Image (tube, rainbow, N blue to C red):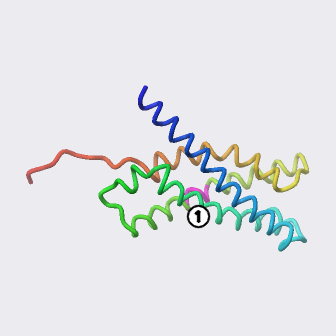
Amino acid sequence: MKLNTALAVRFAKFVSTSFVGTLADMLVLWLLSDLVFTRGYWGEYVISPAISFQCAVAVNYTLSYFYIWKDRTLGSPDASLKRFFKLYLAYNLSGTAVFLLRLGILLLIERFTGWDVLLCNIVAMCFSGILNFAIDGKLIFRKKRTFGKSDH
């Protein structure tokens, strides 16, 4: 039961901090789609979400590293600036893979509903959030295996 409680607390942290990343994503998406890429489908529905996603990745990774998974990062014996950026690269790559899935969902929603890009993005984020949490816990911020000390 303790494991389930710890997982629930971590998931609650993930969901709550995801709102900060979502706000960054949506703000940048709104600025780009309404002020920069005002003409054309690709600028509004592909380029703007890609750039806003990278802003959200930076915000979410920082919160993940220092808050959600801090027992696996800061508490790790190999915690270092090099590891911080190594994990950021892995986080960004996995997040990008999930983003491509999210972008596909966003485009499908837009195609079938005609909704604004911001609303399509929110709906698509709901689908991709759980996948991100699972990847973070099992791959990016996984627990280090500890082996018994050897006399060799």
Q: Residue at x 15, y 48 (%)?
A: 149
Residue holding disc 1: 58
Helix or strand or loop: what does disc 1 sit on? Answer: helix
Q: Residue at x 48, y 36 (%)?
A: 7
In this orientation, which residue lies closer to the viewer: 20 or 46?
Answer: 20
Image quadrant occupied by the C terminus:
bottom left
Q: Which residue appears farthest toward the top when viewing the image?
A: 1
Say whether residue 143 is left or right of residue 126.
left
**Residue at (47%, 53%) from the top-left corner?**
140
Percent x, y of residue 48 = 77, 66
Highlighted magenta segment, given as a residue range: 93-97
Residue 135, above or below 23: above
The magenta stretch spans residue 95: yes
Crowd rating for badge 1 (residues with CA inside 10 Å; few <14, some 14–19, many 20+): some
Residue that protrudes farthest toward the left in the picture: 151
Q: Main secondary structure of the magenta part?
A: helix
Image coordinates for residue 83, horizontal then vertical, percent: 40, 65
Q: Residue visible at 43% across and 25% down?
A: 1
Total tally of numbered discs in the picture:
1
Is residue 81 placed above or below 11 in the rendered structure? below
Q: Which of the 4 image quarters holds residue 43?
A: bottom right
Left or right, 56 with respect to 142, comes to right
Residue 41's image quarter?
bottom right
Residue 141 image point, x, y percent: 44, 51
**Residue 37 locus on image (x, y percent):** 84, 72
Q: Quadrant of residue 47?
A: bottom right
Residue found at the very far bottom of the displayed protein? 36
- Going by the numbered disc 1, the residue's amino acid type is Ala
Of 67 and 33, the residue lying toward us: 67
Would residue 139 be found to the left or right of residue 143 on screen? Answer: right
